[in-house]
Amino acid sequence: MTFGSVIERSVARPLMRLVTMGGAPILQQLHLEERLLRRTSDNWCIVNDGTAPPTIVMGVSGKVSELVEIRPVLQDHVPVVRRFSGGGTVIVDQGTVFVTFICNKTAVAGLQPFPRDIMSWTGQLYDYAFDHRKFGGNAQSITKDRWVHHTSFLWDYDVKNMSYLKNPQRAPEYRQARDHTDFLCRMNEYMPSRSVFTEGITAALGDHFTVQHTELETALPDHDDFVPSTKVLSPQDLQDIISAKETPTSQRVQGWPH
């Protein structure tokens, strides 16, 4: 795996605050990221090594009925989170390594704040696939002055967990209609350790930014009434989706007010 190292040395590097976490729940991480995006003006990199319990994370506009096997999820009490950003659906656990960038639009010289451009820039820092098999899934949210790009890397994964996800009806052409196990690979098949990966990212960041390690406790103001939009779908939410799908349209129309 390669890490980027190209930089114009004559240009002063902007500050990047680096927060590292180990095993933080993905809901906590997403709440933190949204808060940093909307309530601060600094550039941030968040690295979280693993999460528990196994959790399904969906994009803001994803349709649960098309992306999630709801009945087994309910039976096995698997949490389903709808995050604040776009992108696809993943299931994350202790085998997942998370890397998120939260940046001002002026943080990277020449970078246009569009998904394809942001993807191209992060591709200078790390890869997303080996031999046409993917190990990194990403999503973005772009506001007026800032953007967030978060990636979940599959250091390892449990095949059973992948069975909770449906193959998306709309998928990139490079997926070639492959199911999850044929489409994905594990990073631990290609790299010696998780620390080699995370330390490589930090080193690559240093070629583009002045990196400042920041404790989570000092990252945010003490008093903040921010309410994140990332939510956990309740079992009742999921059951309602099943009920709505099973109820014939004609019966639902009869219940509408006239």
Image (cartoon, grey):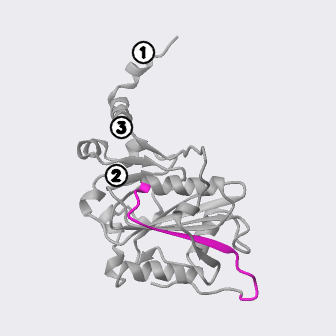
Which amino acid lies under the numbered mark 1 shown in the image of this protein?
Gln
The answer to whether 97 appears left or right of 226 in the picture is left
User: Is 70 included in the stretch rendered in magenta?
Assistant: no
Q: CA distance from mark 1 to mark 3?
A: 23 Å
Location of mark 2 (residue): 166
Q: Position of residue 48 (x, y in %)?
A: 44, 66
Above-or-below relation of 229 to 149: above
Q: Which region shows up in magenta?
A: 9-26
Q: Residue furthest bottom?
A: 9
Q: What amino acid does circle 3 point to?
A: Leu
Q: Earlier in the sequence, mark 1 or mark 3?
A: 3
Callout 2: few (<14), some (14-19), or many (20+) C-alpha neighbours within 10 Å? some
Q: Is residue 179 visible?
A: no
Under circle 3, the secondary element is helix
Q: Is residue 78 above or below residue 171?
A: above
Q: Please give the name of the residue rendered at 75% of the width and 83% of the height, measured from the top-left corner.
A: 11
Residue 159, x across and y down, in percent: 25, 63
Tell me the distance, in whole angstroms, between the alpha carbons under discs 3 and 2: 15 Å
Q: Residue at point 59% right, 87% down?
A: 5
Q: From the image, tell me which residue sits under label 1.
A: 254
